Amino acid sequence: MPKPLTLDHNKLWKILKEMGIPDHLTCLLRNLYAGQEATLRSGHGTTDWFQIGKGVRQGCILSLCLFNLYTEYIMRNAGLEEAQAGIKIAGRNINNLRYADDTTLMAESEEELKSLLMKVKEECEQVGLKLNIQKTKIMASGPITSWEIDGETVETVSDFILGCSKVTADGD
């Protein structure tokens, strides 16, 4: 998933409305984010002040909630709830797990996984976000072909960390 610092504020307000957040709460958030400015200081000096029109406030208690609403909107519009792709766990079809700003997509086949990923990628682009292919990884329990998305090769891994747990291709 894209990072919280890249969320466009105007798209965020539209998403909050579509997700059913009451107008008075969205108005409060708009006022909180209105007119934000920043300057950068380095060893070479300080920049001029500039407007901030993207991202959620680092350290703000609302930021994770706003980011989660944004990503939930993406997943819903990608149709993951209705998708048949996924793995069956206790009779339920599970095709995605999310922890903070990390998303794991799961499927029984390479074709299903690629379909899920492309749906998420398309929905990200619809709301002005770009899927970071360098941070996108594939893990398979069997042989898998090399994937390319937008001319970039997607790395295949034998394990990854989800939250505080290590997930491995062989299930250990």
Image (cartoon, rainbow, N blue to C red):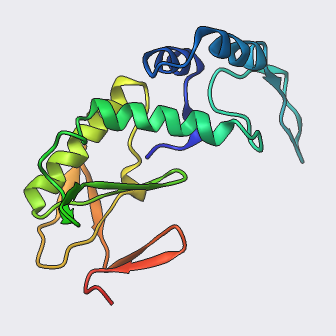
The image shows residue 11 at horizontal and vertical percentages of: 50, 18
Most foreground residue, 137 or 141: 141
* Image quarter hosting the C terminus: bottom left
Q: Residue furthest bottom?
A: 172
Number of marks present in the image shown: 0
The image shows residue 116 at horizontal and vertical percentages of: 20, 47
* Residue at the (43%, 25%) spot, across then down: 128
Describe residue 141's horizontal placement relative to residue 67 as left or right: left
* Residue at the (34%, 24%) spot, across then down: 126
Q: Residue furthest front?
A: 91
Q: Quadrant of residue 33?
A: top right
* Residue at the (59%, 33%) spot, across then down: 66
The image shows residue 108 at horizontal and vertical percentages of: 12, 64
State whether residue 26 is above or below residue 63.
Answer: above
Q: Quadrant of residue 54?
A: top right
Describe residue 27's horizontal placement relative to residue 66 as left or right: right
The image shows residue 103 at horizontal and vertical percentages of: 41, 54
Describe residue 86's horizontal placement relative to residue 136 as left or right: left
Most foreground residue, 139 or 152: 139
State whether residue 16 is above or below residue 137.
Answer: above
* Residue at the (12%, 71%) spot, across then down: 144
Most foreground residue, 94 or 152: 94
Most foreground residue, 70 or 138: 70
